[in-house]
């Protein structure tokens, strides 16, 4: 790789959402329920291929968590990205199904790499990370809905996890049975509620074109996850079904019993989905990065999102999802003559979800561009949680005043969240905070209590 020039930031989009993402992969391990119809089995982490970029990196380092984090830190530094606000993403198999000792050692090793020293135990590693040069401000774990029980929630809180992604694919029990998914819709509902009640931010992986569905059914299921109060995720990853070498679906495809959607069908369907996503939800990603050597059928267009959003802009469709409105991407894509207003207003949207009241607070300008947000949940048990506080724009180093970040937007959002909490006659506000963000909240009058940062009124 040719090194960037002195002032050049290579792949600038990587940190335009305000944090530096580092993905680490756990070692290969088969799912206990068996294999889903569409999932390949290729002696690498389940659902991945040997030539998937994160697998190549992880395999070269023998799936060592510490070495993976160090490698990504070095790469981001070479590309001239800031590395003191890290979002750690644990990928691979169903991480919470691994032996407990492996899980705790893996997470501790990630913190050790960020801290540049090895700790005696996980708690010490987390404590050190509160003031480290590379702070873990967010930690995401991918899991299955049936591996999200109370004991799993407890473990994730001990890890310092703040966000959980559930492999939902298609909320339909008949489809789940036919594809050998190994869980039911009720597991999705229960996992979603448990996570929100514990303060986590919740993401769903959705799969248009899944076997035994069709575009009309896909759209119907998609509408359901935002109309039914049992679901309502905070974010989505949309992964259209592809036929991958080594999957059972490959055999069905060869026998003419399954046909993936064409690029045109997928694009048309996802544009309709875009228009249905509410303003409190972020579409994190579209398309999985499957190397052509392992793709038997299905669209090869990895950057399909680019085509979709170009069509949306061309048709001047109204889109409310978060990423489409973020200031960082708006600044990147704006024309030279275009001006972006910095005059902001606080907008509050209240909605019911999983038995609680969600308050979605956002700072937007008169163009609808999003600068920062806060997710406040008031549960049916009269407990208040801030499930996310995020200011967007180019990531700024801790202690520096950025173009958007570190200018008081987060502080103002928290102040409003506290006001709403008090109005609901609740005397304590809990924040699910990445360990590297604890110092920020302490400056706002919060203190560590168990696994949360809290303030009493």
Image (cartoon, rainbow, N blue to C red):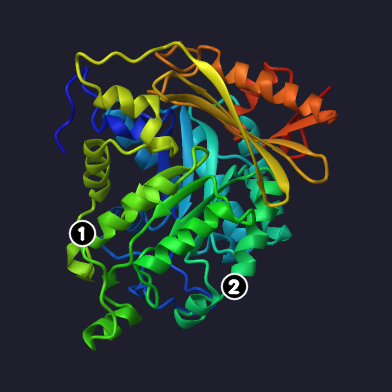
Specify few, some or many for label 1: CA neighbours under 10 Å numbering under 14, 14-19, or 20 or more: few
Q: Position of residue 396 (x, y in %)?
A: 42, 19
| Viewport quadrant of the C terminus | top right
Quick check: can you spot residue 217?
yes
| Viewport quadrant of the N terminus | top left
Name the residue carrying label 2: 184
The image shows residue 405, relative to residue 202, as above or below, that is: above
The image shows residue 226, relative to residue 259, as above or below, that is: above
x 45%, y 46%: residue: 277
Number of callouts in the render? 2
Left/right placement of residue 285 relative to residue 407 reads left
Left/right placement of residue 450 relative to residue 256 reads right
**Mark 2 residue element:** loop
x 31%, y 55%: residue: 287
Q: Position of residue 157 (x, y in %)?
A: 67, 46
Q: Nearer the viewer, residue 264 or 447?
A: 264
Q: Position of residue 24 (x, y in %)?
A: 43, 50
Name the residue carrying label 1: 264
x 27%, y 46%: residue: 305
Q: CA distance from mark 1 to mark 2?
A: 31 Å
């Amino acid at each position: 790789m040719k090194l960037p020039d002195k002032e050049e930031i290579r792949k600038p989009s990587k940190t335009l959402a305000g944090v530096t993402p580092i993905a680490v992969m756990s070692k290969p391990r088969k799912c206990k329920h068996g294999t889903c119809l569409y999932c390949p089995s290729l002696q690498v982490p389940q659902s991945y291929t040997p030539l998937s970029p994160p697998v190549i990196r992880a395999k070269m380092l023998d799936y060592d968590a510490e070495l993976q984090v160090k490698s990504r830190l070095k790469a981001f530094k070479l590309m001239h990205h800031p590395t003191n606000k890290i979002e750690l993403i644990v990928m691979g198999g169903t991480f919470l199904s691994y032996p407990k000792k492996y899980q705790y050692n893996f997470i501790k090793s990630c913190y050790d790499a960020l801290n540049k020293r090895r700790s005696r135990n996980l708690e010490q590693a987390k404590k050190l990370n509160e003031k480290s040069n590379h702070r873990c401000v967010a930690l995401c774990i991918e899991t299955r809905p049936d591996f999200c029980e109370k004991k799993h929630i407890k473990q994730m809180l001990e890890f310092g996890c703040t966000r959980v992604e559930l492999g939902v694919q298609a909320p339909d029990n008949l489809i789940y049975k036919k594809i050998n998914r190994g869980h039911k819709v009720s597991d999705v509902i229960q996992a979603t509620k448990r996570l929100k009640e514990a303060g986590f931010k919740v993401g769903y992986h959705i799969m248009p074109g899944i076997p035994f569905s069709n575009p009309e059914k896909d759209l119907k299921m998609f509408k359901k996850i935002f109309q039914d109060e049992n679901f309502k995720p905070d974010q989505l990853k949309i992964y259209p079904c592809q036929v991958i070498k080594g999957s059972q679906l490959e055999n069905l495809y060869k026998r003419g019993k399954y046909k993936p959607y064409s690029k045109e069908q997928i694009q048309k369907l996802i544009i309709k989905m875009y228009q249905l996503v509410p303003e409190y939800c972020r579409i994190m990603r579209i398309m999985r990065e499957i190397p052509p050597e392992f793709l038997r059928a299905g669209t090869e267009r990895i950057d399909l999102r680019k085509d979709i959003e170009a069509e949306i802009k061309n048709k001047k469709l109204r889109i409310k999802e978060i990423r489409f409105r973020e200031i960082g991407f708006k600044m990147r894509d704006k024309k030279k003559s275009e001006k972006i207003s910095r005059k902001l207003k606080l907008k509050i949207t209240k909605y019911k979800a999983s038995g609680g009241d969600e308050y979605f607070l956002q700072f937007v300008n008169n163009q609808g561009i999003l600068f920062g947000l806060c997710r406040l949940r008031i549960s049916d048990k009269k407990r208040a949680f801030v499930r996310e506080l995020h200011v967007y724009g180019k990531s700024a180093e801790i202690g520096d005043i950025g173009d958007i970040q570190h200018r008081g937007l987060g502080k103002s959002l928290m102040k409003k969240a506290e006001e709403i909490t008090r109005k609901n006659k609740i005397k304590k506000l809990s924040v699910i905070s990445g360990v590297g963000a604890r110092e920020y909240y302490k400056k706002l009058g919060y203190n560590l209590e168990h696994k949360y940062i809290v303030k009493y009124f």
